[in-house]
Image (spheres, rainbow, N blue to C red):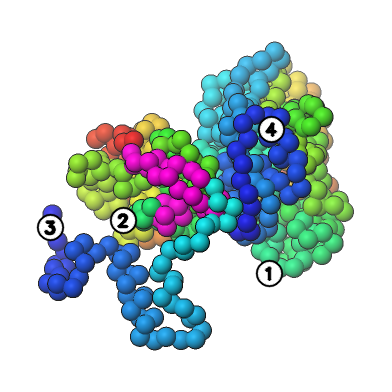
C-alpha cells in the first residue's frame, strides 16, 4: 500500500472539501478500496473517512423509498421497507459477497466498486485501459471467460461486478450526489458509463462528489420483483449471469416489465429491448424467451465467454418464470 | 483436559514458561538466522524487533478490544487485522488471503462480523471489537468453541478462529434454523481442509447452547 494521510469527516461539507483535494478518496466500508490499495491499483494520497456522516437511514418517502448511501448492505437487505417495496434489491444484496462483507460494505461504495477483471487487478500485466489508459486490453485475446458480452468496446470488456446496481438500474433508481456546488440527481442507468474509448471513466460522478442516497420509485413492478444470480459456486461468488426482473400483470397479460442483466455487461445492463418485447404479452416461457433473444441479439462473445450469451437468456427466462409463478 | 498421545511435556528449564507458537517461531527464526547469516538476508536480528521510528502519517486511535482499551499511534495503512496481530499480539485472528476472500480474519465489531483485513484500524476508534481471544469467560470456553471441539469442526485449525467468530454472529443473527441456512450464512468462511460437515454440526449444536452470546 502507498502512504496516505487519513482524516475523519465530521459533516458533509467538510467531507466534500476534504474529498475534493487532488488524490483524495472517500472511504466507507473499505472492502473494495482497501483491497485495491493493497494491490496498488488505487493509490490515494488522502483518505477521507465518511462513516461519521448521518447517511445510513432507509425510509419510505413520498413516491418511493430512499436508501442512505452509508447504509450497510446487510441492513438494507433485511430492511422490511426494502423487502416490501423492492424485493429485488434485498435479494440482490443477499446474493452478494459474504455476510462479513455485507456488514461492512455500504450502498454508495457498492455502486462505486471497480471491476474484478484479473488484468485490472494485477499490475504485472501492463496492458489495461482502465488502469493504464491507452495501454490496450489484455482480456480481449486473453483469459476472458468471466468477461462481458454486451456493452463492450475494442478498449475494454471488463464486467461490472455489482448485483445491487443491477436491481437499482432495473427499478428506475435515482442516485443523489452532493458536491461543492450543491446536489443533483442522476438516473441509475446513466450513472455507470460504457467503456467506449475511455474505460477508465466509469461513473457520472465528479471528483469530490459524494453519493448521499439512492431512491427507488414505488411501482407495482418494483413491489413484484426478484433477482436471480447464476455463478460458479452456490454462494460467495460473482455472477456469470444475473437478472433483476419486475412484472406488473393485468390478468395473465404483462402490463409493464422491468429487466436488467448482471454479470454479462460492462455496466449494469438495463434491458429495454426485453422490456418492450414483454409488454402486452402473456406470461409464457415463449414470450420470455423472445424477450431474452431481443436483448441479447446485440451480444458478442470473445471466445471463452461465448457461453454467457445463452446462459443470460436462460437466466432471464427462469427469473421471469419464477416471478410469474411457474409458467408453461 | 486430555492431551494427545504425541505430546511430551517440556522438562527443559530454558523453555519459556508458556511459549506461544509465535514466540517459538520468532525465536526459532532468530536462531536459524544467527546460525546461517547470509548477506542476502540483510540484518536478520532486526526482523523480530518492532520498529521504533514513528509511523508514516502517524494517526492516533483508541481500540477497545475484548474489553480493554489500547491507545495506539498507527500508520493509517495498518489494517485492523495487522493492528490486532502486530501491535496487540492478538494472533488468534489469522491472516490468510488478506483480500476478503476467505474469512480467516473474521472478528466482531460492535457484535457484527467483519473481515478485519479489509478495514483500516484507524476507522475503529469507539467500536467494541471482539476477537477469538475475547470469547472465553473465566477460563470457560464459549459455547461455539466447545461445540467446534465436540463436533470435530476443524482439521488444521487455521481458519477456525474466523469460523468461530463468524458462527457466533450467525447464531446471534438468527441464521441457524436449518443446515442449509447455516451453510449459506457460513459461506464467507472457507476451510481448505474441508471440515464443513463438522462445522455445520458445531454451529447447529452451539445454536441450542447459547452460541450467539457476544462478550464485550
- Distance between the Cα atoms at labels 3 and 4? 59 Å
Query: Which structural element holds mark 2?
Result: loop
Near-viewer residue (B185 or B212): B212
Question: In what quadrant of the picture does the N terminus of chain A appear?
Answer: bottom right
To which chain does the residue with label 1 belong?
A
Q: Nearer the viewer, mark 3 or mark 2?
A: 3
- CB atoms at circles 2 and 1 under 8 Å apart? no
Near-viewer residue (B105 or A303): B105
Q: Nearer the viewer, mark 2 or mark 1?
A: 1
- Residue under label 2, please give it: B154
What mark, if any, has residue B2 been given in the picture? 3
Query: Which structural element holds mark 3?
Result: loop
Image coords of residue B166 (percent x, y): 39, 43
User: Which badge, 3 or 2, is on the more N-terminal residue?
Assistant: 3
In this rendering, would B170 be left or right of B100?
Answer: left
- CB atoms at circles 3 and 4 under 8 Å apart? no
In this rendering, would A52 be left or right of B196?
Answer: right
- Residue under label 4, please give it: A14
Amino acid at each position: 500500500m502507498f502512504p496516505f494521510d487519513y482524516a475523519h469527516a465530521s459533516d458533509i461539507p467538510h467531507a466534500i472539501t476534504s474529498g475534493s483535494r487532488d488524490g483524495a478518496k472517500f472511504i466507507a466500508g473499505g472492502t473494495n478500496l482497501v483491497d485495491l490499495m493493497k494491490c496498488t491499483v488505487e493509490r490515494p494520497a488522502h483518505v477521507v473517512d465518511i462513516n461519521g456522516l448521518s447517511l445510513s437511514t432507509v425510509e419510505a418517502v413520498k413516491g418511493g423509498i430512499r436508501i442512505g448511501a452509508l447504509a450497510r448492505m446487510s441492513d438494507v437487505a433485511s430492511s422490511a421497507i426494502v423487502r416490501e417495496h423492492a424485493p429485488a434489491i434485498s435479494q440482490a444484496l443477499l446474493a452478494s459477497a459474504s455476510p462479513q462483507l455485507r456488514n461492512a460494505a455500504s450502498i454508495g461504495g457498492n455502486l462505486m466498486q471497480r471491476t474484478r477483471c484479473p488484468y485490472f487487478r494485477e499490475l504485472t500485466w501492463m496492458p489495461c485501459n482502465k488502469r493504464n489508459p491507452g495501454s490496450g486490453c489484455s482480456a480481449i485475446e486473453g483469459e476472458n471467460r468471466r468477461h462481458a458480452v454486451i456493452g463492450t468496446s475494442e478498449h475494454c470488456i471488463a464486467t461490472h461486478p455489482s448485483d445491487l446496481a443491477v436491481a437499482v438500474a432495473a427499478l428506475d433508481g435515482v442516485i443523489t450526489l452532493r458536491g461543492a456546488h450543491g446536489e443533483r440527481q442522476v438516473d441509475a442507468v446513466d450513472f455507470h458509463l460504457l467503456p467506449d474509448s475511455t474505460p477508465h471513466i466509469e461513473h457520472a460522478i465528479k471528483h469530490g462528489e459524494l453519493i448521499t442516497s439512492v431512491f427507488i420509485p414505488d411501482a407495482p413492478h418494483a413491489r413484484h420483483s426478484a433477482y436471480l444470480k447464476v455463478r460458479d459456486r452456490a454462494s460467495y461468488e460473482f455472477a456469470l449471469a444475473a437478472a433483476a426482473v419486475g412484472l406488473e400483470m393485468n390478468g395473465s397479460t404483462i402490463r409493464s416489465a422491468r429487466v436488467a442483466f448482471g454479470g454479462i455487461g460492462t455496466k449494469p445492463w438495463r434491458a429495454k429491448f426485453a422490456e418492450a418485447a414483454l409488454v402486452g404479452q402473456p406470461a409464457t416461457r415463449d414470450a420470455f424467451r423472445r424477450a431474452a433473444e431481443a436483448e441479447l441479439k446485440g451480444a458478442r462473445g470473445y471466445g471463452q465467454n461465448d457461453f454467457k450469451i445463452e446462459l443470460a437468456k436462460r437466466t432471464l427466462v427462469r427469473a421471469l418464470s419464477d416471478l410469474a409463478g411457474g409458467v408453461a | 483436559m486430555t492431551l494427545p498421545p504425541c505430546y511430551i511435556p517440556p522438562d527443559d528449564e530454558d523453555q519459556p514458561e508458556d511459549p506461544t507458537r509465535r514466540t517459538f517461531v520468532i525465536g526459532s527464526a532468530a536462531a536459524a538466522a544467527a546460525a546461517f547469516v547470509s548477506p542476502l538476508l540483510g540484518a536478520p536480528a532486526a526482523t523480530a524487533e518492532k520498529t521504533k521510528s514513528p509511523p508514516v502519517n502517524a494517526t492516533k486511535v483508541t481500540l477497545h478490544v475484548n474489553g480493554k482499551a489500547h491507545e495506539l499511534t498507527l500508520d493509517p495503512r495498518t489494517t485492523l487485522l495487522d493492528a490486532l496481530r502486530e501491535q496487540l499480539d492478538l494472533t488468534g485472528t489469522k491472516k490468510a488471503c488478506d483480500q476478503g476472500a476467505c474469512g480467516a480474519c473474521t472478528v466482531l465489531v460492535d457484535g457484527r462480523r467483519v473481515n478485519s483485513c479489509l478495514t483500516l484500524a484507524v476507522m475503529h476508534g469507539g467500536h467494541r471489537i471482539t476477537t477469538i481471544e475475547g470469547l472465553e469467560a473465566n477460563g470457560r470456553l464459549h459455547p461455539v468453541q466447545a461445540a467446534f471441539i465436540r463436533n470435530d469442526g476443524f482439521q488444521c485449525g487455521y481458519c477456525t478462529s474466523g469460523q468461530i467468530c463468524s458462527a457466533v454472529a450467525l447464531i446471534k443473527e438468527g441464521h441457524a434454523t436449518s443446515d442449509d441456512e447455516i451453510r449459506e450464512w457460513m459461506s464467507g468462511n472457507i476451510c481448505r481442509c474441508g471440515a464443513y460437515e463438522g462445522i455445520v454440526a458445531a454451529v447447529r449444536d452451539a445454536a441450542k447452547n447459547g452460541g450467539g452470546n457476544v462478550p464485550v
